[in-house]
């Protein structure tokens, strides 16, 4: 066996930072959830595949250990959710085949809760007897995104949409836009200017600019061509993100923001966001909004007739004699997509 390159060893001291940290000693978490970046570096360097980036390899490996915010706006962000589900399924499949683990892996010393709370303890009352009581699908309930981007920006986007429609604001009349919010919104939505569709999902400037330019921000707006277009890039540069101390002082439990739009006639229009994000349990979609969302997404792959037929079948699914009819409609010839 060939020795590991020095690059892999250089990561080791950093991974043991708790030994030098002033915080209390933390039990070792070798591999954490599954992966450490160090072994990935030599794999990337030795890969025969052209374009295998060491930086991308390390980013993916870092998120495989535990999802990290720095990967927001990249392909690795949705990998967080996928890996979490995959790891749960793999664990259950391994256990079913006789693979063993510690019988008290969660709450004792050296267990999961102690390791991931940095030895500071955990609240057992929030766990014991609470699994499935209630199921989150019941409470707080299901949320459906009105926009294909970070949910923290949705109330701001709705506020912008109300403003431009109510005052019939034309894109060419906009001099500047300010998004006032707390750090619970501005920190995760980390991109001042988006350069591609993935970054746009975490870019407040793109979110409000899409509304300003098209009065909507659906799946057709979140594409590289629109993000990089001259009108979009120009509009995003008119947007200022403002950390508002009054909003910050109200706490993090709500998604609060205010949109201010300066016009070329000297007026400044202001719209406050609704703290209840649309599509969530406190402000659920109307049936019409739900159908509009489905139609917008499905229009990329289905013709209008198939979309209408699908909606009708799903709404009456319990009365459908044969579910294969729904499969037939969903297998219709793909739509001719015009961006």
Image (cartoon, helix red, strand yellow):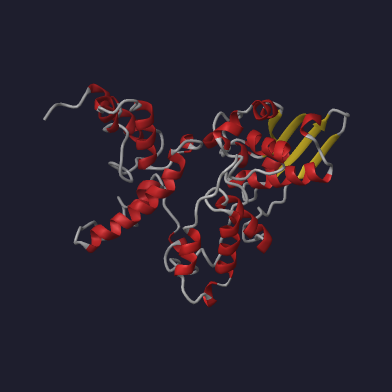
The N terminus, quarter of image? top left
Q: Position of residue 108 (x, y in %)?
A: 32, 56
Quarter of the view holding residue 100 = bottom left
Q: Is residue 224 above or below residue 326?
A: above
User: Going 43% across and 49% down the picture, which residue do you hit?
Assistant: 81
Q: Is residue 85 above or below residue 226?
A: below
Residue 74 or 312: which is nearer the viewer? Answer: 312
Q: Position of residue 50 (x, y in %)?
A: 31, 25
Q: Left of 137 or right of it: where is 37?
A: left
Q: Left of 331 or right of it: where is 187?
A: right
Q: Position of residue 157 (x, y in %)?
A: 68, 44
Q: Left of 14 or right of it: where is 311?
A: right
User: Going 15% across and 26% down the picture, which residue do you hit?
Assistant: 3
The C terminus, quarter of image? top right
Q: Tag count in the figure?
A: 0
Note whether residue 105 is visible: no
Q: Left of 316 or right of it: where is 78?
A: left
User: Going 81% across and 38% down the picture, which residue do you hit?
Assistant: 169
Quarter of the view holding residue 107 = bottom left
Residue found farthest to the left: 1
Q: Is residue 152 above or below residue 287?
A: above
Residue 233 or 182: which is nearer the viewer? Answer: 233
């Amino acid at each position: 066996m060939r020795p590991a390159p020095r690059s892999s060893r250089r990561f080791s001291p950093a991974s043991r930072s708790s030994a030098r940290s002033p915080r209390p000693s933390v039990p070792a978490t070798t591999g954490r959830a599954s992966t450490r970046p160090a072994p990935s570096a030599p794999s990337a360097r030795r890969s025969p595949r052209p374009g295998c980036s060491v930086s991308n390899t390390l980013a993916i490996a870092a998120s495989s250990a535990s999802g990290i915010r720095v990967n927001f706006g990249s392909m690795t962000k949705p990998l967080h959710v996928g890996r979490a589900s995959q790891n749960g399924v793999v664990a259950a499949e391994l256990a079913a085949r006789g693979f063993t683990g510690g019988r008290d892996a969660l709450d004792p010393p050296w267990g999961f809760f102690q390791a991931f709370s940095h030895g500071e303890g955990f609240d057992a009352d929030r766990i014991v007897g609470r699994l499935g009581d209630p199921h989150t699908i019941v409470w707080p309930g299901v949320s459906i995104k009105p926009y294909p981007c970070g949910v923290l920006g949705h109330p701001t986007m709705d506020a912008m949409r109300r403003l431009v429609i109510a005052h019939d604001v034309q894109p060419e009349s906009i001099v500047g836009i300010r998004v006032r919010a707390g750090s619970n919104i501005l920190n995760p939505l980390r991109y001042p200017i988006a350069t591609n569709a993935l970054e746009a999902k975490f870019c407040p400037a793109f979110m409000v600019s899409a509304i300003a330019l098209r009065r909507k921000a659906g799946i057709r707006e979140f594409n590289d061509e629109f993000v990089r277009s001259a009108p979009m890039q120009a509009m995003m540069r008119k947007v200022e993100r403002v950390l508002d101390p009054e909003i910050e002082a109200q706490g993090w439990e709500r998604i609060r923001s205010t949109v201010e739009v300066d016009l070329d006639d000297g007026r400044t229009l202001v719209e406050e966001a609704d703290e209840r994000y649309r599509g969530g349990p406190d402000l659920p979609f109307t049936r019409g909004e739900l159908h509009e969302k489905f139609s917008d997404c499905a229009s990329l792959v289905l013709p209008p007739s198939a979309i209408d037929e699908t909606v009708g079948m799903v709404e009456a699914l319990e009365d459908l004699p044969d579910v294969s009819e729904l499969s037939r409609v969903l297998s219709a010839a793909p739509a001719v997509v015009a961006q």
